[in-house]
Each structure stands twice: as structure tokens, then as C-alpha cells.
Amino acid sequence: MTIEPPRFEARRPTGPRDPGDAWVVAPTGERYWGRYGAAGLLALDSSRGVLLQHRVSWSHFGDTWALPGGARHENESPCDAALREAQEEAGVPDGAIRPRLLSVFDVGYWSYTTVVGDVVVPFEPMISDPESRELAWVPPPQVDVRPLHPAFEQSWRRLAPLLDVRPAVVVDAANVVGSVPDGWWKDRAGAADRLRSRLETLAAQGVPSSALGLSESIWYPKWSLVVEGAARAVTDAAGDVRTVRAEASGDDAIVAETERLAASGHTVTVVTSDRELGRRVTDAGAAVHGAGWLLELLPTD
């Protein structure tokens, strides 16, 4: 593998080039853009479709359609890189995208990460650098009608069937907290707070696809934490974890949350070791994992 600088400066014609903006040349001669790998954003708007970029003719595989994306910076996460590149190339504003999954193509010395994200704040894309000839929202069934960049064409075949997969996890807080004898009974609300904090970290990190029985690399499910009794005094906090305070039976609230998510098209996993509750949510269409499954995924305090 060798590193080859670009023959022209596409992104910053009047400014410094980032060290990541270089070709990685494989021993067999293939060239991959990005010294530290590359990433792109597949933004999905439920009413308008997928955001595609019509690449200018002088770019690599010019005049084809692909995703906004480009070279990662050193020590930059794939998700951060994809969102930054989408902002630079298509004017995607901060906070407009909620990541749903990461798909990684890795050849060992170079990788490309596709971040599939849902549009949570609608926006109009803007051509904001010289690499774009056109930007368009394209309904998924019409994507492969256009001439696609070869690499995107291959990944699209894998990703298109996953656009309807939206995982969600409902956590039985009492069951999970009660599975660890750490004195939780002295302060049930505080124990629920600590669990939610760890869930927030996990929500940001994502869950390995194997843990959810899905394909690709990392998924970012929606999270619901159901609390009951004294744990209902858990602190209000803005974040990625929805807190559901059971008015009466915690089990009934978990079943209701499961049914709500399933009705909205989510693939639901319920975390509980309670067998009867497990039977009820299975009847509601959910998969069930015990508390140990979640505890293995959670970051340590």
C-alpha cells in the first residue's frame, strides 16, 4: 500500500489540504480516496427519499450519482466524518440527521463507512463545494434508475432492503436494575438515573448488529426506559432515551410501549428476564432478551 497525493485540489482550491485528502494505492493498483478511510451519508427523508449527489465530470467516476461523502480526518469517527462531509458538500445542517446504522466496507488497509441516517429536521440541500453538479431527493425505487458510482451501486443493493428496518429497544428498568445487588433498593430513582445515563452512552455508541440479529455493522435503535413505583422520580433529562413512567403496572406500560413502537413500523426488542412479561411482549411481536444481554452491552460506570 502506498499513499498518493491528489493531482488537483477539489475541495479547498484556496486553502490547506487535510492530511487525509490523499489516495491509498493498493498493491494491485486499485486507488481508494482517503488516507484514513472515507465515509458518506445516506440521508433518508420519509416523504422525499434519499439525498443523492450528481458528481462533476472531472471527479472520480464523474457524471455518476452517489452519496455526499469523502475522506476522513485523522482520529475522526466515521459518523462525524460522514456528517461533516455532507455539510460541506450538500449543506446538511447540524442536528438534521439521526444515525440509524453504519455499513462498513473494509479491505484491511482502507475502509469506507456508509452512515444511514433519518432526517429528523427537514432541510433543502445546497451545493456548497465544486464536487457537486446537482443534489436531489430520490425515491428509493428510482435510485438505481440513475447512473450510479460503481461502489455506491454495490452498497445500494445491500442497503436498500434495510431502509424499512427500524429497531427499537424497550427496557424493563426494574428488572434490569434488580438483577445487580448494588444497593439499588436504597434509592430506586437514583438507580434508574444511573441506568438511563449508561443507556444514553450506549445509544450514542450504537449496538453491534449481531446483538440485534441484523446485518451490517452498527445500529442505533430507539430506546425506551420504562420505570415504575419509586423509580418514577427519575430525573427529567433530554437525550436519546425516552423515559416512560408507568401510571400503574410496569408490565402493562412495557406492553403498551411495545405495541406503540410495533404499530409505527419498528422492530422491537424488549429487555426483561420476567417470563410472563416476555410471553406478553412476544405476543405483541417483540423479541426478548434477558437483563444480562443488556448488561454486557452497557459501558461500565
Image (cartoon, helix red, strand yellow):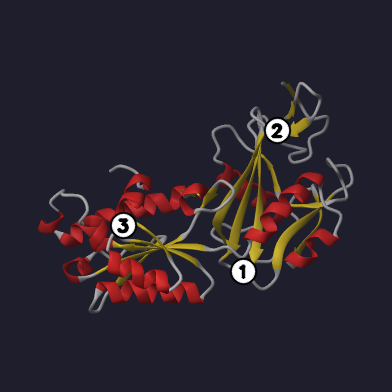
Residue depicted at x 46% and y 72%: 261
Q: If the image is split into quadrants, where does the C terminus sit?
A: top left
Per the image, label 1 sits on a secondary structure element best described as loop
Front residue of 288/173: it is 288
- Return the residue at label 3: 196
- Label 1 or label 2, whichever comes before in sequence order: 2
Q: Residues within 10 Å of mark 3 (few under 14, many from 20)?
A: many
Q: Is residue 208 left or right of residue 175?
A: right
Image position, residue 296 (x, y; %): 35, 45
Mark 3 and mark 2: Cα distance apart in space: 39 Å
Residue type at tag 2: Asp
* Numbered disc in front, either 3 or 2: 3
Q: Classify 9 as above or below 145.
A: above
Q: In this view, which residue lies farthest toward the bottom?
A: 248
Q: What residue type is disc 3 on?
A: Arg
Mark 1, other Cα within 10 Å: few <14 / some 14–19 / many ≥20: some
Q: Nearer the viewer, residue 273 or 22?
A: 273
The spot of residue 285 in percent (x, y) is 46, 71
- 1 or 3: tag closer to the N-terminus: 1
Local SS, label 2: loop
**Quadrant housing the N terminus:** top right
Q: Amino acid at mark 1?
A: Pro
- Residue 258 position in % (x across, y down): 41, 72
- Sort mark 2 into few (<14), some (14-19) or many (20+) by Cα contacts within 10 Å: many
Sequence-wise first label, 3 or 2: 2
At x 84%, y 42%, the residue is 59
Res. 122 mark: 1
Q: Residue 21: which numbered mark, if any? A: 2
- For this view, does 294 lie left or right of residue 163? left
Give how far apart the Cα atoms at labels 1 and 3 are: 29 Å
